[in-house]
Amino acid sequence: MKGQIGKTKIQVVNDNITNIGVYVWQKANGKFFTDGDNNVLNIPARKGDQSKIDELTKAASYYGQPEGKAVFFEGTARISDEEYSVQQDRMAQGYIPSENDLGALIAAKKTQEMYGNEE
């Protein structure tokens, strides 16, 4: 899947609409720090929020991975397993997976304006 981070449930959406996203911990070898369930060590933040970067750095060190860096993914958000399942269902039905995906909503509106509605 384009933009997917490894085998995780996080996807990169780089639409330059927002400076809100998540910082994830990238180990010195270039791989992202994950637990046994492929959940990435991350923290929601605004781009450049040094206090959040420091929190993530401390957490990475606590969990045994002090070598590495915080990498920002714009427009990305944490979701629960339940939200992920709902998004998969919405996508399978032809809907925008996340009703909070501003970039996708803007693109859908532009497409509708250009080509009209199915109905």
Image (cartoon, helix red, strand yellow):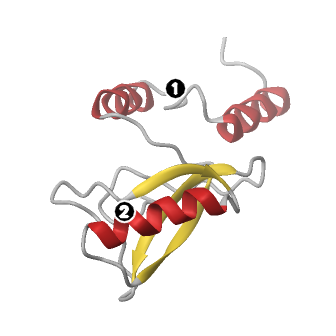
Could you tell me which residue is drawn at 59 percent across and 64 percent down?
72
Could you tell me which residue is drawn at 63 percent across and 48 percent down?
75
Question: What's the distance in space between the residues labelled 1 and 2, CA to CA?
Answer: 37 Å
Q: Is residue 11 above or below residue 31?
A: above
- Please tell me whether mark 2 sits on a helix, a strand or a loop: helix
User: Horizontal and vertical percent for residue 70?
Assistant: 52, 71
User: Horizontal and vertical percent for residue 3?
Assistant: 50, 61
User: Horizontal and vertical percent for residue 35?
Assistant: 21, 60
User: Horizontal and vertical percent for residue 113?
Assistant: 84, 27
Q: Is residue 22 above or below residue 88?
A: below
Is residue 2 visible in this depiction of the protein?
no
- Please tell me whether mark 1 sits on a helix, a strand or a loop: loop
Picture quadrant of residue 26? bottom left
Kindly give the residue lying farthest to the left in the view shown.
36
Quarter occupied by the N terminus: bottom left
Density class for disc 2 (Cα within 10 Å; few <14, some 14-19, many ≥20) is: some
Mark 1 is on which residue type? Answer: Tyr
Mark number, residue 95 = 1
Which residue corresponds to mark 2?
59
Density class for disc 1 (Cα within 10 Å; few <14, some 14-19, many ≥20) is: few
Kindly give the residue lying farthest to the bottom in the view shown.
29
